[in-house]
Image (cartoon, rainbow, N blue to C red):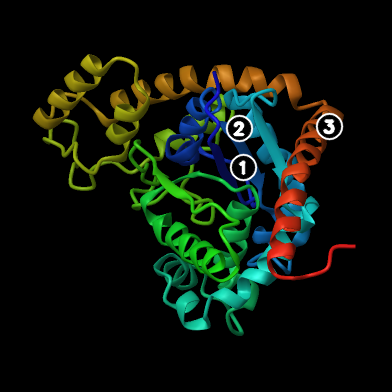
Amino acid sequence: MTNSKIVLTGDRPTGPLHLGHYLGSLKTRLELQDKYKVYILIADIQALTDNFDNPKKVSDNVLEVLLDYLSIGLDPQKTTFVLQSAVPEIAELTVFFMNLVTLGQLEQNPTVKTEIEQKRFKGGIPLGFLAYPVSQAADIAIFKANLVPVGEDQLPMIEQTREIVRRFNRYYGNILVEPEAMLSKFPRLPGTDGKDKMSKSLGNVINLSDDAKTLEKKVRGMYTDPARVHATTPGNVEGNPVFTYLDAFDPDPKIVEELKTRYRKGAVTDAEVKERLIKTLNDFLDPIRSRRAEYIDNREALIEILRSGTERARKITATTISEVKAALSLKNF
């Protein structure tokens, strides 16, 4: 039987989802949809905070992200998919929340500071981007979510949400739910270039939608051990992305351990290890590709899944915003 607790999670539709998304959040969502009431928000408004000059990129990726969700096995009968821009109550609550957080608090949010450094905005930081933790707090609070699955780097965002909710409840009555972070139990995947994080903007990702030929090309070009000149040179397994991916996705750990032993001794080539990874990832992605093929040419079905999910969600958000306005002594006509 489904637990009564509510889970809220989501993604910004700025490009296809990749293996890092799968391990960091999507795999957890598959488990959660059988235990809790799960809402997944396609956060197109938040995507505009740093893509305001290219809104078509955002709109074009809304259904692509939904397609990725369905391809991995998320079930619209169990999980409610919601389009953020079609839920005006979120924007309303965001405005109310802006009175409950200071500019200094937003500027000191470690997650925001890191992302600002990475994005290197020209001409100044857009206010919408700086304030997106407030919008994210509204996303969570409007659904009265109990649990929010996140990676460790997103913990400051959840703590800021908790602070805003506490402040609201202290001023206006115990209306909203203070959420808890649910940390991912799976490790973060490095980029194919050996960088610490797999990122769409860095182009070091393997997408869930990649075909076999694309996958093979990416794996063959993967960073391994730069100090290993010849196959007979002992190599490092630690920090080697090829082995990190094998640890995460290969169903036979004994074979992986054997390859590690041989690699450390200089008794296996990089090419042989990568062949194993190509097979492993194709075996993992083939069922995803098959499910994707069922939906890819049926845009109407995708739109209906998103429309019906958003309509169901708005019954919840309308109730919450009505309670919030009453607590704020605002008239509801």
Pinpoint residue 89: horizontal percent, then vertical percent. 75, 57
Q: Residue furthest right?
A: 333
Q: Is residue 204 above or below residue 174?
A: above
- Crowding around mark 2 (Cα neighbors within 10 Å: few <14, some 14 to 19, many 20+) is many
Which of the labelled discs sits on residue 16, or is there none?
A: 1
- Front residue (pair 313, 260): 313
Give whichever of discs 2 and 1 has the lower sequence position. 1
Residue linked to disc 2: 209
For the residues bearing labels 2 and 3, Cβ distance under 8 angstroms: no
The quarter holding residue 247 reads top left
The quarter holding residue 156 reads bottom left
- Front residue (pair 292, 173): 173
SS state under label 1: loop
Q: Tell me the residue at 69%/37% (across/down).
A: 81
Please state which amino acid type lies under the numbered disc 2: Ser
Give whichever of discs 3 and 1 has the lower sequence position. 1
Pinpoint residue 100: horizontal percent, then vertical percent. 56, 74
Please state which amino acid type lies under the numbered disc 3: Glu
Residue linked to disc 3: 304
Specify whether 226 is left or right of 320.
left
- Crowding around mark 1 (Cα neighbors within 10 Å: few <14, some 14 to 19, many 20+) is many
Please state which amino acid type lies under the numbered disc 1: Pro
Q: Is residue 188 above or below residue 287?
A: below
